[in-house]
Image (spheres, rainbow, N blue to C red):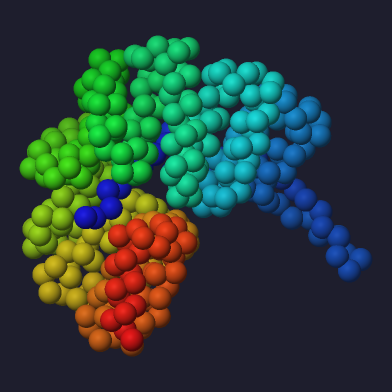
């Protein structure tokens, strides 16, 4: 079964900015080397980090200005795909806000929500689920079940439960959240539709693919009407619809849809964005499914380096892509097959463990190359 794609929020009090649209500080630094002093202007994560540490020294670790600067620094690290460093900064901010404001203060919970997102992006799903559950339960107590922030936390928690394979636990939660979002935010609100996307994915995992497809087509139609076909969440919904088509052996129908999605995503997103990577992975699956193996191999060879840069070598989606690449190389008798199969197996063993189905699949490919 193909990987269902989910685009999360970095923080639930503001949407993530588009890649490359940073509007943070620009700082001049002077570096002395070999007796020469050179002044350089820096921006991006380095400038955010320098600002955070400067505020730390000037105002103190728990000052509101310092903590907000730290949060912005972590967001910028996320946008630069420095996920491990972002996790470390978010953990630091959560600890400081918990000490200064209390563990259930809204600002502390927002930072924990962001930490959960970063952990999920890193592939630490079990830890992300624990943190997100803490946020959800705290918001239920403090804000109530129908508050928008509570509902968004429940939405993310439901997705993490699906990622962990706990679909029976996820379904009632997501149904409750989807109903609450429709009442609180509106039936066509982006968050409401995002929750319905997760429910459709859950139905697909449960083998109820016709129900999932109907729900997805309805969500795509409403998103296209309200946001246009190339908004991030519209692209996500179209990508998830492809998973249903491909998993139901409808590759011929999926080829054109996957190519259109990949072209639309390429016009609006960076080459390392998860939506574009997912679209290209789906297109490769579709091409292979209609016998166009050579095209699929070339596409995956071009896409894998972008997935490694954008999501990381050991991200589950990168490993799934590499396993498909190795499979197609084995089928084609390509000399690269052994190396790619071994790389896929090593990664799956690190991330999933030796007994996971994905690991077993990679191990079978290695045996075929001997």
Left/right of residue 258 with respect to residue 109 in the rendered view? left
Q: Which residue is depicted at the point 20% across and 52% down?
A: 243
Quadrant placement of the C terminus: bottom left
In the figure, 258 relative to 18: above or below? Answer: below
Q: Which residue is depicted at the point 34% across and 78% down?
A: 366
Q: Which residue is depicted at the point 22% across and 41% down?
A: 201
In front here: 313 or 341?
341
Left/right of residue 157 with respect to residue 53 in the rendered view? left
- In the picture as drawn, the residue positioned furthest to the front comes out as 355
Instruction: Estimate the x, y position of residue 234 in percent, counting from the top left.
Output: 25, 41
- In the picture as drawn, the residue positioned furthest to the right comes out as 35
Q: How many marks?
A: 0
Left/right of residue 335 with respect to residue 229 in the rendered view? right
Q: Which residue is depicted at the point 32% across and 61% down?
A: 358
Q: Quadrant of residue 51?
A: top right
The answer to whether residue 220 of the structure is visible from this angle is no
In the figure, 50 relative to 99: above or below? Answer: below
Q: In which quarter of the image is residue 250?
A: bottom left
In front here: 143 or 81?
143
Left/right of residue 190 with respect to residue 92 in the rendered view? left
Quadrant placement of the N terminus: bottom left
Instruction: Estimate the x, y position of residue 116 in percent, counting from the top left.
Output: 48, 37
Instruction: Estimate the x, y position of residue 303 in percent, counting from the top left.
Output: 35, 66
């Amino acid at each position: 079964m193909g990987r269902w794609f989910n685009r999360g929020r970095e923080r639930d009090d503001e949407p993530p900015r588009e890649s490359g649209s940073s509007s943070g500080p620009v700082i001049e630094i002077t570096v002395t080397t070999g007796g020469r002093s050179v002044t350089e202007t820096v921006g991006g994560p380095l400038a955010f980090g320098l600002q955070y540490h400067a505020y730390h020294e000037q105002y103190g670790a728990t000052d509101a200005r310092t903590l907000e600067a730290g949060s912005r620094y972590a967001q910028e690290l996320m946008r630069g795909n420095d996920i491990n460093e972002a996790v470390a900064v978010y953990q630091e901010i959560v600890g400081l806000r918990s000490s200064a404001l209390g563990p259930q203060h809204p600002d502390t919970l927002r930072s924990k929500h962001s930490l959960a997102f970063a952990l999920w992006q890193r592939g630490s799903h079990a830890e992300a689920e624990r943190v997100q559950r803490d946020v959800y339960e705290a918001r239920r107590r403090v804000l109530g079940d129908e508050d928008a922030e509570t509902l968004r936390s429940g939405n993310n928690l439901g997705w993490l439960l699906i990622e962990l394979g706990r679909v029976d636990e996820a379904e009632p939660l997501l149904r409750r959240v989807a109903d609450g979002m429709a009442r609180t935010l509106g039936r066509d609100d982006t968050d409401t539709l995002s929750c319905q996307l997760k429910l459709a994915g859950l139905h697909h995992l449960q083998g109820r693919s016709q129900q999932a497809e109907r729900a997805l087509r309805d969500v795509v139609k409403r998103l296209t009407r309200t946001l246009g076909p190339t908004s991030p969440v519209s692209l996500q919904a179209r990508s998830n619809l492809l998973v249903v088509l491909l998993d139901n052996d409808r590759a011929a129908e999926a080829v054109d849809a996957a190519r259109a999605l990949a072209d639309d995503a390429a016009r609006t997103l960076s080459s390392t964005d998860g939506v574009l990577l997912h679209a290209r992975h789906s297109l490769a699956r579709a091409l292979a499914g209609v016998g166009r193996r050579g095209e699929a191999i070339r596409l995956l060879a071009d896409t894998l380096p972008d997935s490694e840069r954008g999501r990381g070598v050991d991200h589950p989606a990168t490993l799934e892509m590499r396993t498909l690449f190795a499979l197609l190389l084995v089928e084609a008798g390509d000399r690269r097959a052994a190396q790619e199969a071994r790389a896929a197996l090593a990664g799956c063993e690190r991330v999933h463990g030796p007994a996971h189905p994905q690991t077993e699949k990679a191990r079978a490919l290695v045996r075929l190359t001997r």
